[in-house]
Amino acid sequence: MRSVPRIHLLDATLANQIAAGEVIERPAAVVKELVENALDAGAKRIEIDLQEGGRRLVRVRDDGSGMGREDAGLSLQRHATSKLRTKDDLFAIGSYGFRGEALPSMAAVSRFVLVSCEPGALKGTRIEVEGGAAPRIADAGAPPGTTVEVRDLFWNVPARRKFLKKAQTEQSQCVDAVLRLALPRPDVAFSVRDGDRALAQELTFGVVRWQAALDWLISQKTDGRPQKPPLQILLRLGW
């Protein structure tokens, strides 16, 4: 009698939840992927809202190029991307992201909402996905750009959720992710909030602020524990 289980294909939802854990490990990964998407969309202003350090909510709002209804729907399909067409494009990557995995991964392990509108369009598109279920798509009024909300990260994957750290630790990692992306982009304004608290207000980097942020990043310890930036750096950054 055969005792070894036979090979079978995983359910699509379960497969997406497993794959999501490889792309989205914690709230800071959500922040990083969404801010990179905003930068690739040509945004000049990016607002990041957190709740409980991103454990309860990560919302990223931008004023970039936005998406029409068709592209917005495709963006939630795995390996759908506007960044590549042929294998030769792999040798001339000019964007932050290109694999087309981030949004479907987030949608598989959260309560996910995407609202997007192209400049000049009469209406935008709203897409809601709960834990990888079938998306609900509707027209919506929206300003040009894209807003993505990721609520209750890993609510449907308890084994992943239990590895999230305390809110303060996750918050620090999220801010660090924003700083690393903001440093080389003085042409883009960033702001970060957690609940009612402004963590970074109108974070645009001139020479002094760039150096202050760089000093902080260089001073970070390498033992994996996030460090609070020194007070003088916070003041110079306007935090």
Image (cartoon, grey):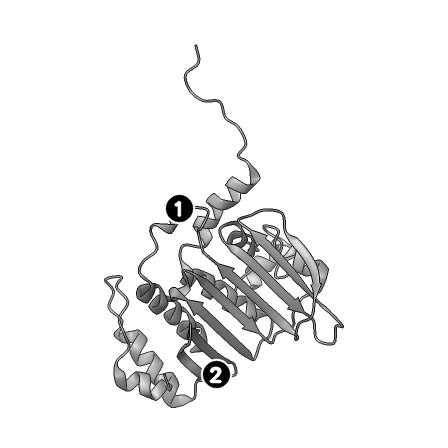
Q: Which mark is residue 186?
A: 2
Rendered view: 82 above or below 10: below
Question: What residue is at 53 percent from the left and 34 percent from the top?
Answer: 10
Instruction: Give percent across and percent down for residue 181.
Output: 45, 72
Among the 4 quarters of the image, the one containing residue 184: bottom left
Q: Which mark is residue 136?
A: none
Task: Point out the tag, 2 or 1, that comes first from the N-terminus.
Answer: 1
Instruction: Give percent across and percent down for residue 197.
Output: 39, 77
Q: Which mark is residue 158?
A: 1
Q: Secondary structure at mark 2?
A: loop
Q: Quadrant of the C terminus?
A: bottom left
Q: Residues within 10 Å of mark 2 (few under 14, many from 20)?
A: some
Rendered view: 85 above or below 206: above
Mark pair 2, 1: CA separation: 39 Å
**Count of marks, rendered view:** 2
Asked if marks 2 and 1 touch (Cβ < 8 Å), the reply is no
Q: Residue furthest top?
A: 1
